[in-house]
Image (cartoon, rainbow, N blue to C red):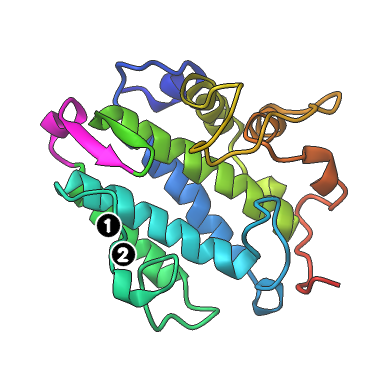
Amino acid sequence: MNAETSAATPDPSSDPRPLFERAADQMTSLFAAVQPGQLTAPTPCEEFDVGGLLSHVVGGTLRIAQAGEGGGPGEVDPEAKVDSGVSGVPEDGWTEPYARARERFAAAWADDAKLDAPVTVPWGTMPGRFAVAGSVMETVTHSWDLAQALGRQDLLDPALATFALGVARRAVPEERGEGIPFGPPVHVPEGADEYGLLAAWLGRTPEAHSTRTQGTPQGGGRG
């Protein structure tokens, strides 16, 4: 599959696994960019600060890996009592758990037959390719969240946002009620790029986090 083409043109019949790898590479770069003082900084994903979002991304990757292994959509380790399903990770130690989660994800989805087999993930039961495409959308969206929080928009790949936006518009209805884990679409500021359009479709407010300088790491803290 040509990943550049698929990123620019979302196709329900395509293999989304190469795009997941690209999205995960992007996320890995953002994990590596986090400084210890930034862990309590807020993110556009209002439920999480930076440290909480790192944990959430690891947990989301493991949950879709678990689905590819034939498991259900539940927590990877309910006893862990943390969103990632991984206990005992120091605040500045999420890079290695994410690398392991990526490896597990790749192994779980290595068999081409799984792309057409039904799987159950947190947002429903569907063919595997749609579950993986949804994971691309989630990973790309949370990459934007982290980039905004860190002031590292320079690490974002615009083509991934194009694909993720296409998935979001197919998968997330404009009218949202109970059971939809996103707020309603918000106003898109003039000149918004594909990441801004994606964020707005998924209920984030791009202009609320648009004043940070690209490429300049920000200090932590909520003050």
Residue 65 horizontal side relative to residue 20, left or right? left
Task: Say if 116 sits above or below 60 in the image.
Answer: above
Q: Residue at x 68, y 55 (%)?
A: 46
Q: Position of residue 105 (x, y in %)?
A: 27, 51
Above or below, comparing residue 39 to residue 168 in the picture = below
- Residue indicated by mark 2: 100
Image position of 50 (left or right of 11): right
Q: Amino acid at mark 1?
A: Glu
| Quarter of the image that includes the N terminus | top left
Amino acid type at image mark 2: Arg
Do we see residue 16 in this rendering? no
* Numbered label attached to residue 200: none
* Residue 118 in which image quadrant: top left
Q: Secondary structure at mark 2?
A: helix
Residue in front for this viewpoint, 161 or 202: 202
The percent coordinates of residue 44 (x first, y second) are: 70, 51
For mark 1, what is the residue? 103
Q: Position of residue 75 (x, y in %)?
A: 31, 60
Q: Looking at the rendering, which quadrant does residue 199 occupy? A: top right
Is 130 one of the magenta-colored residues? no
Q: Residue at x 66, y 27 (%)?
A: 194
Vertically, is 76 above or below 8?
below
Q: Is residue 114 found inside the magenta-colored segment of the image? A: yes
Give me the residue at 58% from left, 57% from top.
Answer: 30
Find residue 101 and report its horizontal and vertical position in percent: 32, 60
Q: Are marks 2 and 1 in contact (CB under 8 Å)?
A: yes
Left or right: 117 in relation to 199: left
Q: Which residues are magenta?
A: 110-121
Q: Residues within 10 Å of mark 2 (few under 14, many from 20)?
A: some
Q: CA distance from mark 2 to mark 1?
A: 5 Å
